[in-house]
Structures are given as C-alpha cells and as structure tokens.
C-alpha cells in the first residue's frame, strides 16, 4: 500500500549537517519527498506532536531538546513507507540500532536520536497535519 509518513530530522542531526545524507538514504530506498521545511518547534507544537508522552519522566527534556534549534520536517511517500522509514531509521535507542541504520550512523543517545518517524497510519495522518497544510503537500 502506498503510505505517507511524517519524518523529522531532529536538531542534533540537522546541526551536524547530516540532512543531505539522511535524505539520500530515504530517496535511494524508494521514498519520495512530498513536503519539506525547516522550522523551530515551539512548546505548543511539541505538545501536539508528542501528546502521548506528556507526563512521562523524559517529556520536559524531550521538549527542551526539540525546541532548542531548527529541525527539518518532511512528508515521505512510497510503498509501505511507514514501516520502511522506521526500518531505515533503526531502533529508538541508537545503542540498539542495527548496523547501517540512520540512528546507528548519526545518533548519540535515546533523546538525541537524529530522526523521528510516524509509527502507524493514524499517527502519520495526525502528525502530517501538525506540520503541513494541504497547500504545502505535493503529489
Ligand atoms: P521519537 O521517535 O521522536 O518519539 C519520542 C521520543 O522520545 C523518542 O524518539 C526519543 O527521542 C525520546 N525518548 C523516548 N524514550 C526516552 C527516554 N527513556 N529518555 C529520553 N528520551 C526518550
């Protein structure tokens, strides 16, 4: 099934100039960019995007990090895009990420873990519309 998914290149990876290499990885693995922008997350945006994590012990630190500097937001599309992107990203904790995955290559810790990607169809639809309106998404 052709799916859309939201991907963020987090402030750590953007700051280290890994954006080009990460985009190349997605494109070379059959994914196509439908939307792309640079932005700085606000606490309000973070609360929407990470609503399921509000109240967890790492939430404040997560929001502090995600709002600290610019990040890249994008919508990727392709066959099984959600699972494909998550496989390319690797495990949330880079110490557990498989060799060759984006997090193994470019992440430092569970929080500074280079990328975020939607974990299912419902979250993809929800997250895409937090960052993009319809006029910013192209077929
Ligand atoms: P992400 O895919 O963006 O979704 C939630 C984020 O919370 C996750 O990546 C991690 O960066 C972060 N996270 C998850 N678990 C922890 C944890 N135990 N400590 C700190 N950050 C975490």
Image (spheres, rainbow, N blue to C red):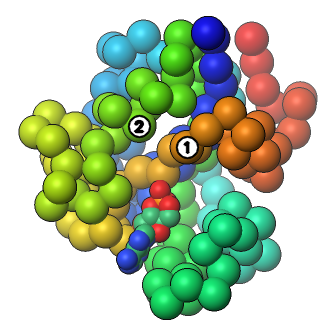
Give the mark nearest the N terminus, 2 or 1: 2
Identify residue for label 1. 119
Residue lying at the far left of the rendered structure: 99
Q: Residue at x 20, y 49 (%)?
A: 97
Query: Residue 13 sits in which quadrant?
Result: bottom left
Image location of residue 38, percent across then percent down: 60, 50
Indicate if the residue with disc 1 has its beta carbon within 8 Å of ligand 1.
yes
Q: Quadrant of ligand 1?
A: bottom left
Identify residue for label 2. 86
Q: Residue at x 69, y 45 (%)?
A: 123
Q: Secondary structure at mark 1?
A: loop
Image location of residue 46, percent across then percent down: 68, 70
Q: Residue at x 33, y 14 (%)?
A: 28
Binning the other alpha carbons within 10 Å of mark 1 as few (below 14), some (14 to 19) or many (20 upward) gives some
Binning the other alpha carbons within 10 Å of mark 2 as few (below 14), some (14 to 19) or many (20 upward) gives many
| Front residue of this view, candidates 25 and 37 | 25
Q: Judge from the rendering whether residue 12 lies leftward or rightward of residue 47; answer left or right.
A: left
Q: Kindly tell me whether residue 20 is visible in this rendering.
A: no
Q: Judge from the rendering whether residue 36 lies leftward or rightward of residue 25; answer left or right.
A: right
Does residue 76 sit above or below 37 in this rendering? above
| Front residue of this view, candidates 102 and 13 | 102
Question: Which of the image's four quarters has the N terminus?
Answer: top right
Task: Give the Cα separation between the discs numbered 2 and 1.
Answer: 8 Å
Do the residues bearing badges 2 and 1 touch, measured as CB atoms within 8 Å?
yes
Question: Which of the image's four quarters has the C terminus?
Answer: top right
Q: Judge from the rendering whether residue 83 lies leftward or rightward of residue 16; answer left or right.
A: right
Label annotation for residue 59: none
Q: Residue at x 34, y 56 (%)?
A: 92
Q: Kindly tell me whether residue 83 is visible in this rendering.
A: yes
């Amino acid at each position: 099934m052709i799916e859309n998914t939201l991907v963020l290149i987090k402030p750590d990876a953007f700051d280290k100039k890994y954006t080009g290499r990460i985009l190349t990885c997605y494109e070379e693995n059959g994914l196509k960019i439908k939307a792309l922008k640079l932005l700085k997350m606000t606490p309000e945006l973070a609360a929407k995007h990470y609503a399921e994590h509000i109240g967890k012990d790492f939430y404040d630190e997560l929001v502090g990090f995600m709002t600290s500097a610019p990040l890249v937001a994008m919508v990727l599309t392709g066959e099984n895009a959600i699972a494909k992107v998550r496989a390319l990203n690797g495990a949330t904790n880079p110490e557990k990420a498989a060799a060759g995955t984006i997090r193994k290559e470019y992440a430092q810790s569970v929080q500074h873990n280079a990328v975020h990607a939607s974990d299912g169809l419902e979250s993809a639809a929800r997250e895409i519309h937090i960052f993009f309106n319809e006029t910013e998404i192209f077929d």
